[in-house]
Image (spheres, rainbow, N blue to C red):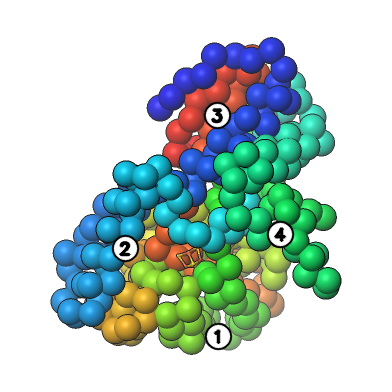
């Protein structure tokens, strides 16, 4: 963990945090992901699959040596903020800082800008735009800190996002079938092996949000609810029996993990969302204290 001394202006400090997190996430993938990729390489038995995983390792090694990005797709910057009720900066100002930080990182690094107007397809040039970056908010009572997590999401994997409004009669079997259908249908498109995030319950929009939360967990962590954790284990095993393999070229390792987040739902609903995260499952976090002290860490 790196601690940075308190700055004078909190909004400017947060701008720096956003810029740092975006670039850090793109260049230096977390240790738990590195371990999962190494374990995948060791257990893969297909010659082609093993070669793909060795190429991924070489890719990471070169990125480390050259302090460069692990993938050219800088994604869209997606932030999650946990804001304490006593944090002395209004969320409006927090959002402004995150947006300005994303722009600074894009221009100063420089990073490829992916952000376009959704109709005209005109590139905004700074990886920001109308309602970009995307920020998810949580508010925490009796606390004066701020946690920020940046999860840049590449399009190859984000395009492999699926939602099904199962009916309650479909039960858990329907959930499992939909997850398997989605991953088999995606094949090599989301740059496997990655993390399959599954969101169940809530509403249509919330199920997808939960799936996105699931992909941002440390690789291999289990849901605190033992029933959900058991489903994670079962899906992880089933998904790796599909034979899709690294980059869809066949093999034992189709996914590094399956994570599930859940919410209670309406008695006549059974929503299931799948959000695939590629092998370059990038994420980085920081804790910002009310006095502006910043601790850079992977998790919050
Ligand atoms: S899906 Fe991931 S690994 Fe594939 S190109 Fe996009 S960011 Fe890179």
Comparing labels 2 and 1, the label whose residue is closer to the camera: 2
Comparing labels 1 and 3, the label whose residue is closer to the camera: 3
Residue 213 vs 54, above or below: the answer is above
Image coordinates of residue 288 in percent, x first then y, are: 59, 25
Mark 2 vs 3: CB contact within 8 A: no
Rate crowding at label 1 as few (under 14), some (14 to 19) or many (20 or more) other CA atoms within 10 Å: few
Q: Residue at x 55, y 39 (%)?
A: 21
Residue 92 vs 289, above or below: the answer is below
Marks 4/3: CA–CA distance: 27 Å
Say if residue 172 shows up in the picture: no
Rate crowding at label 2 as few (under 14), some (14 to 19) or many (20 or more) other CA atoms within 10 Å: some
N-terminal-most mark, 2 or 3: 2
Q: Which mark is residue 115?
A: 4
Residue, disc 3: 287
Residue, disc 1: 170
Q: Which mark is residue 56?
A: 2
Q: Residue at x 59, y 50 (%)?
A: 111
Q: Residue at x 66, y 29 (%)?
A: 14
Say if residue 29 shows up in the picture: yes
């Amino acid at each position: 963990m790196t601690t940075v001394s308190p700055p004078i202006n909190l909004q400017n400090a947060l701008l720096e945090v956003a810029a740092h997190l975006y670039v850090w996430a793109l260049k230096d993938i977390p240790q738990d992901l590195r371990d999962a990729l190494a374990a995948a390489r060791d257990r893969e038995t297909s010659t082609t699959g093993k070669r793909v995983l060795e190429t991924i390792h070489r890719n990471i090694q070169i990125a480390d040596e050259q302090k460069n990005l692990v993938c050219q797709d800088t994604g869209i910057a997606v932030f999650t903020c946990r804001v304490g009720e006593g944090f002395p900066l209004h969320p409006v100002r927090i959002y402004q800082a995150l947006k300005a930080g994303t722009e600074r990182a894009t221009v100063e690094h420089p990073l490829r800008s992916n952000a376009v107007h959704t109709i005209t397809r005109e590139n905004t040039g700074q990886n920001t735009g109308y309602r970009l970056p995307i920020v998810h908010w949580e508010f925490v009572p009796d606390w004066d800190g701020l946690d920020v997590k940046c999860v840049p999401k590449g399009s190859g994997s984000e395009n492999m996002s699926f939602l099904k409004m199962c009916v309650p009669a479909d039960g858990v079997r329907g959930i499992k079938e939909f997850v398997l259908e989605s991953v088999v249908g995606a094949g090599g498109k989301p740059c496997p092996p990655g993390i399959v995030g599954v969101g169940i319950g809530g509403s249509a929009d919330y199920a997808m949000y939960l799936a996105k939360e699931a992909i941002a967990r440390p690789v291999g962590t289990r849901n605190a609810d033992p029933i959900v954790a058991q489903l994670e284990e079962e899906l992880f095993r089933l998904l790796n029996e599909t034979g899709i393999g690294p980059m869809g070229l066949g093999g034992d390792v189709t996914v590094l993990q399956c994570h599930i987040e859940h919410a209670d739902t309406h008695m006549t609903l059974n929503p299931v969302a799948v959000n695939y995260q590629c092998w370059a499952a990038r994420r980085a976090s920081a804790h910002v204290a009310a006095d502006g002290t910043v601790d850079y860490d992977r998790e919050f």
